[in-house]
């Protein structure tokens, strides 16, 4: 028991409770099996009704799971399929999210030039959509890429611009 008389739970149990309440995505708890099952159910449901956006979203979620587990080739394939789906239905916000994750995946693998290109394309879409939070995130990610390649002046400018959002 805690000092307040409530049962004491492990951090994993607290995390799982937050997932059940919808307050955290399941992969935050590193329960990969449950996360993959949830994404699989979402994709099956979307495929059953022909929901192209739902299928693309489930592919994006699967790509994030693959990336977090170091399965980069699988993540790239899922991102390519998600980008096609979002493009098919004209979902520019979805495309921006895919490009964001593509940039993260490329950066994680040390491919700074490809990461920068993906982040810049996502930034342009997010600016067009008026997505200030997305713009701030892309500017920050571009600052990290600039820092990684040694362009500290550009990193500072981008970082400050991102923080100002």
Image: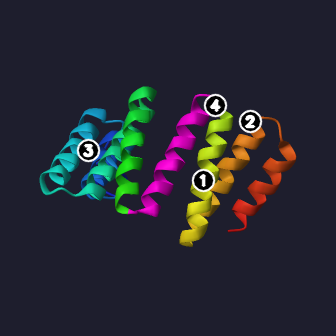
| Label whose residue precedes the other's in the sequence (3 or 4) | 3
Residue identified by numbered label 4: 111
Residue 127 appears in the figure: yes
Q: Which residue is labeled 3 in the image? A: 39
Residue that sits furthest to the left in the current view: 48
> Which percent across, then down, holds residue 92?
46, 62
Mark nearer the N terminus (3 vs 1): 3
Q: Is residue 152 above or below residue 127?
A: above
Contact check, label 3 and label 2, Cβ < 8 Å: no
Tag 4–tag 1 contact (CB < 8 Å): no
Residue holding disc 1: 121
Q: How is the image coloured?
A: rainbow
**Going from the N terminus, do you reach mark 4 or mark 1 first?**
4
Nearest the viewer among 80 and 115 is 80
Q: Name the residue under label 2.
A: 148
Cα–Cα gap, marks 3 and 1: 26 Å
Q: What stretch is highlighted in magenta?
A: 90-110
Residue 91 is one of the magenta-drawn residues: yes
Left or right relative to 99: residue 37: left
Query: What residue sits 57% from the left and 73% below the top?
Result: 130
Which residue sits at x=58%, y=69%? 128
* Chief secondary structure of the magenta portion: helix
Residue nearest the observer in this picture, 42 or 96: 96
């Amino acid at each position: 028991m805690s000092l307040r008389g409530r049962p004491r739970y492990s951090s994993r149990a607290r995390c799982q409770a937050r997932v059940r309440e919808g307050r955290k995505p399941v992969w935050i708890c590193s329960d990969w099996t449950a996360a993959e099952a949830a994404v699989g159910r979402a994709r099956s449901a979307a495929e059953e009704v022909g929901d192209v956006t739902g299928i693309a979203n489930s592919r994006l979620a699967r790509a994030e799971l693959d990336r977090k587990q170091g399965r980069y080739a699988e993540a790239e394939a899922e991102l390519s399929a998600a980008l096609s789906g979002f493009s098919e239905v004209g979902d520019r916000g979805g495309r921006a999210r895919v490009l964001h994750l593509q940039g993260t995946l490329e950066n994680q693998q040390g491919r700074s030039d490809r990461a920068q290109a993906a982040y810049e394309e996502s930034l342009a879409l997010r600016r067009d959509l008026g997505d200030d939070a997305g713009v701030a995130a892309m500017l920050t990610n571009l600052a990290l890429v600039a820092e990684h390649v040694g362009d500290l002046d550009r990193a500072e400018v981008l970082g400050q611009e991102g923080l100002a959002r």
